[in-house]
Image: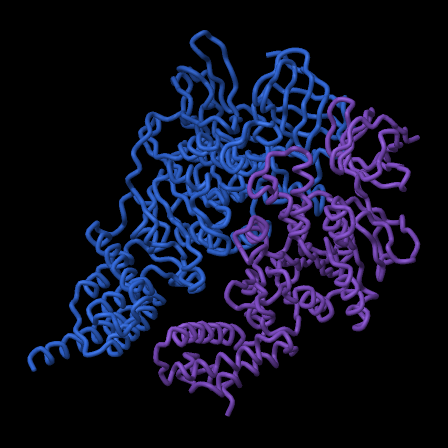
Chain colours: A purple, B blue
Amino acid sequence: MHKIYTHIVQIAGDVITVEADGVGYNEIAEISASRGTSLAQVIRLDGRRVSLQVFAGSKGVSTGDKVRFLGHPMRVASGDDLLGRIFNGSGIPLDKGPVLADNLVESGGPPVNPVKRVIPNKMIRTGIPMIDVFNSLVESQKLPIFSIAGEPYNELLARIAIQAEVDIIILGGMGLKHDDYLFFRDTLDQHGALARSIFFMHTAADPTVECLLVPDISLAVAEHFALNGKRVLVLLTDMTNFADALKEISITMEQVPSNRGYPGDLYSQLAARYEKAVDFDTAGSITILAVTTMPGDDVTHPVPDNTGYITEGQFYLKGGVIEPFGSLSRLKQQVNGKTRPDHRTIMDTMIQLFASYRETLEKQAMGFQMSAWDKKLLNYGGLFEREMMSLKVNVSLEKALDKGWEILHACFSPEETGIKPALIEQYWPK
Amino acid sequence: MPKDRTGRVVKITGNMVTAHVDGVIIQNEVAFVQHGAEALKAEVIRVRADKAEMQVYENTSGLQIGDEVVFTGELLSVELGPGMLGQIFDGLQNPLPPLAAQHGFFLKRGAYLTALAQDVEWEFTPLAKKGDTVRAGDILGSVPEKIFKHCIMVPFGLQGIREVVSIAGLGRYNLKKPIARLRDSSGKEEDVYLKQNWPVKIAIRAYAEKLKPHQPLVTKMRLIDSLFPVALGGTYCVPGPFGAGKTVLQQLISRHADADVVIIAACGERAGEVVETLKTFPELIDPRTHKPLSDRTVIICNTSSMPVAARESSVYTAVTIAEYYRQMGLQVLLLADSTSRWAQAMREMSGRLEEIPGEEAFPAYLESRIASFYERAGAVRLNDGSTGSVTIGGTVSPAGGNFEEPVTQATLKVVGAFHGLSRERSDARRYPAIDPLISWSKYPSVIPERYRVRGHAMLKKSRDVSQMMKVIGEEGTSLADYVDYLKGEYFDFVYLQQNAFDPVDESCSAERQQYVFAFIYDIMEEEFRFQSKEEALRFFQQLRQLTRGWNSSVFKSPEFSKIEQEIALLLEQKRSTNKETSNA
């Protein structure tokens, strides 16, 4: 039924061109080369000339190889059978389990009608005070972790995954180091979260094109679960590798680059993925946490810059801690008014005082004299860094708020905090 | 024009499809690509010999070489008539709630609905009489729509003078029934309906003349109305890095601005933010009309994951609807968030057309497109002598927060006011984060000119001192300079900054602005004398605390007067100690 074509007329980068008829745009084809078979996707149609992006790369593809068009766009099996399994970007198992072909869902499906979304209103508790207290994570939020290479972003991601109260965890790895992949697997396993997790893995050694497939395939499966009422957390690491793969392909396709070599549609490409985060009216939700490594710690680099315009805030991981300045959860106001009456006050007061502490540090560094107030701030800053900011701290929101009062009590008199008398009355440690 | 012209698809790259056509091709006409049962809307954007290059407003997955293309001979148009207020459309004017009712969670490709409900009946009251002579844009009658009398006008496209042959009497009519019949000088007759169509990329010009914008559009934001005002019929832009509060600012303005109709064009931005607007507006009450805010709002929503080509047309759809309401003598405010996404949509299309790229790969016609979009704003005198206006406010999302980039620069050339947001101010939680030292406006303010000038001077002086203090420390600064610095900070904290979460402070009427500014002006002019910097700091901190409480009290309420007296008392005490020290 599917015609086989053998007339490959061009191979450039990972894109091959074959002459064929009756092919649909974005259709999937199978290429049988001497080194094995690979899937490929149609990315341009020009008369009889069909250009395909070869997922496994074009290395070893000969002009005499067979191309068989499958007549459908990229699809992936979904459903409970996937839980605990590991696949590559094309949906082929990397573990020893069977190949799945049930519940096929299309990857890169249509956008959600905005009127079918609900205003996000459920907090996801992570046990990390810098998130829970200061920048609460909200169900259906899309949030990247901005950091430079070498920061413990994957550790942070894994910790959130283990502790977050969600039904399904989907991890999409792009250009991951093999040890990072093992780290994720082992950590989730140790904490018994593997059975509700699905992995889509692309390691740095795999072909570039497969990297591009990872977010779509992860999110297509997530969407399938969410439509069935599940709360899904999707972890994507590292989206900068995804953007670099886009750059590589678009330059191979001779597209005019816009900024530092990235294609002009980088924003739309990233948004198409991040916007899959959703809280469905009458069904489940998708929350996306992604890692965006910033080359040279430069937030104006095209990848973090475009990401920042799309996502609902960002966690800024620096020096092994979540930096309170620069980190932002745009949705926190939707949830932090409903937790405990002192939540917002503790959040604002502690951050304002921490800002003063940072100013004092600057003054100290410049050799200005330290006043009594400066000394109090220095004491406070140290306590805050050790007992709130450190990623070793793992406590519930309520405990973290209590801890906040203790720290304030240890450093200041009630008036110095500027907190409303009614709250002081209720919460100030006696 | 030959109808039913067809062609065949010969090339597909992304959402650009090329078709081979036998016969005439019209630039910018709408075509439908047929694929199985689906018909995907597209627009011709370039013609080369017998090939029409089209941007398809949908995902092109599955389209094949040889698929049929049907050309309509019509430019991309919107339907204008009663029923738009309170509605949510996509960039092509498909109403989203009915789409959701029919197709569920997702936006189904190729599903189009008529923008307005065709069968709903409206109570028509005729105004024109049989035998009247009318021109395009003249009012034939009206129907009530939410809070307005929605005027039914002679179609804007008709040339020359027409005679009213017949007009419907008082009664209920739906959009499909003619309500009048007009005859032109050659005797040709045609029907007029409650609705009319208009091509979005052409401005509606059925008015007598365009006027200079001179009357302020009060946004209830002190920083804008007093220092960087916007005029009815004017234009302004809001560039800023991400996280600086562009969208929050636009949302506040969409709620509080003194406009009759607000059109919100959510162009390529987050869906979540649109959801917030569309779910909360029906519940928020407009203090001017005591009706839900949604009654005066039209939302055009083409969020970032919706097809890119429709994003490009969404700003045109929005401005066309704005112009339509202006023709009724209303003051319309169009808020476009964000024009950078619109520019990026142009860039993507230009890349697919393989045009020679300009700066940062934006097309060479970027500037002229931006200019002609903002030029569609304006205050106009209509044929009947009344006036209406379209004010356009566009946000810009510059790459890396750098205002030197092409979209910001092209926009700055054509707008009348610039509200530049700064990361520095938003990091310091000084909202709205409009940087008073880089922003400007060419429109008249709600406060007297000398006050405005004084405010600017104060801020500049204060900034200079604070820069200097960073180098030489507080110790090295003279007391007089330090007091100027404190005055500037005070002005910033109690006047420029506004608390969006405070029910009173979030909107400040023009009257209140004039009153409060006059009060603060006296403080700025006063020569305070202090013994030490600590004393000065304490004094201004006290003043700031009191004034902030003042901002949160209802204007002219007993509490307002009470706090005003407390502030006056504090100032009086200071003056008397000054006298004592000067006597001593």
Residue placed furthest toward the left: B583
Q: Position of residue A160 (x, y in %)?
A: 69, 68
Q: Up-down: is B261 above or below B33?
A: below
Query: Would you say B516 lies left or right of B348 here?
Result: left
Using the rendered view, name the quadrant where residue B507 is placed.
bottom left
- In the figure, A319 relative to A372: above or below? above
Image quarter in which the N terminus of chain A is found: top right
Q: Is residue B3 left or right of residue A190?
A: left
Q: Residue at x 38, y 62 (%)?
A: B505
Q: Residue at x 51, y 33 (%)?
A: B316
* Front in this rendered view, residue A118 or A77: A77
x then y, percent, for residue B66: 77, 21
Q: Looking at the image, which is closer to me, B233 or B126?
A: B233
Marks counted in the figure total 0
Instruction: Write the residue at 22% across / 52% down.
Output: B453
Quadrant in the rendering for residue A277 = bottom right
Rendering coords of residue B96 (x, y %): 62, 42
Q: Residue B583 at x, y = what percent? A: 6, 79
Q: Is residue B6 left or right of residue B336?
A: right
**Quarter occupied by residue A63:** top right
Res B267 visible: yes
Q: Which residue of the protein is positioned furthest toward the top in this rendering?
A: B186
> Is B546 positioned to the left or the right of A346 in the image?
left
Q: Nearer the viewer, residue A390 or B3?
A: A390
Asked whether residue B117 appears in the rendered view, the answer is no
